[in-house]
Amino acid sequence: MIKTRHPDYELFTTSTHYARNVSCADCHLPYRTEGAEKFSDHHIRSPLSDVSNTCSVCHRWSEADAVKQVITIQDKYKEVLARGKSALVKAHFDIAACMQAGAKDEELTTVRDDLRYAQMHWDFVASSNGAGFHAPLESQRILTTALDRAAQIRLACARILAKHGYADEVVYPDYSTKDKARGTVNKFLSGEAPSLLKAN
């Protein structure tokens, strides 16, 4: 897998704020005054911790409305992020199920390449610190690309499974918590992978 870390600037350059010449410091290092002296606050943090000196400098909304707008954007982002994660996790297991059904490496080359592509797109957005806010439209576009590619992978895996005589559902392990997911990963790493195919 190709991993991306903290692509916040790259995402930000596609945003409305960037197009309006807003800098990182405008939101994350807002100006303060002490007496007649004006200086930037060097406590880097979320703009929501000081809305009156960040968002409200440009937006003539109430603080409550500004916070609501940010949370709405981030909630929508988190929804698509979670859907993408679920689809990608299942795509990983679908490929493993194909292997358990007898598929050879050459049959899986395309779906593995596609999974690497989809996973990289999801990671690109998931690893950013803005939770989708730095560039909402671009974040959603990238996540949708990952989600669409994951769906194509899963469909291709269903065809590969059918080719090998398996037409039932894949049995996904319980990965609902970090500990359960780690336990499943460890089983695969130790060569004791759980069966992902229903017994005949």
Image (tube, rainbow, N blue to C red):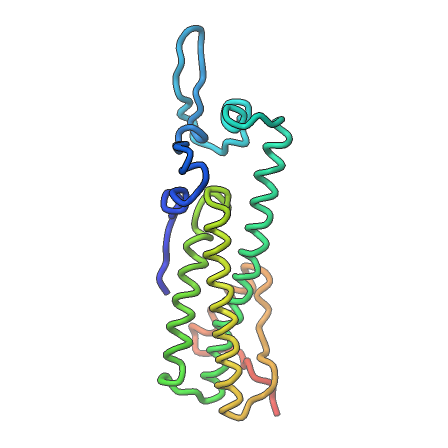
- The picture quadrant where one finds residue 48 is top right
Q: Position of residue 187 (x, y in %)?
A: 48, 73
| Closer to the camera in the image, 188 or 82 | 82
* Residue at x 60%, y 41% (from the top left corner): 71
Q: Quadrant of the N terminus?
A: bottom left
Q: Is residue 95 above or below residue 145?
A: below
* Residue at x 47%, y 51% (from the top left corner): 139
Tell whether 52 sits left or right of 28.
right
Q: Is residue 101 above or below residue 29?
A: below
Tell whether 81 sits left or right of 9.
right
| Closer to the camera in the image, 133 or 32 | 133
Q: Is residue 103 above or below residue 149?
A: below
Count numbered badges in the picture: 0
| Outermost residue, top side | 35
Q: Quadrant of the C terminus?
A: bottom right
Q: Position of residue 73 (x, y in %)?
A: 57, 44
Q: Position of residue 195 (x, y in %)?
A: 54, 81
* Residue at x 53%, y 56% (from the top left corner): 81
* Residue at x 48%, y 83% (from the top left corner): 98
Tell whether 161 sits left or right of 41.
right
| Closer to the camera in the image, 193 or 123 | 123
Q: Is residue 161 above or below residue 118?
A: below
Q: Position of residue 154 (x, y in %)?
A: 51, 75
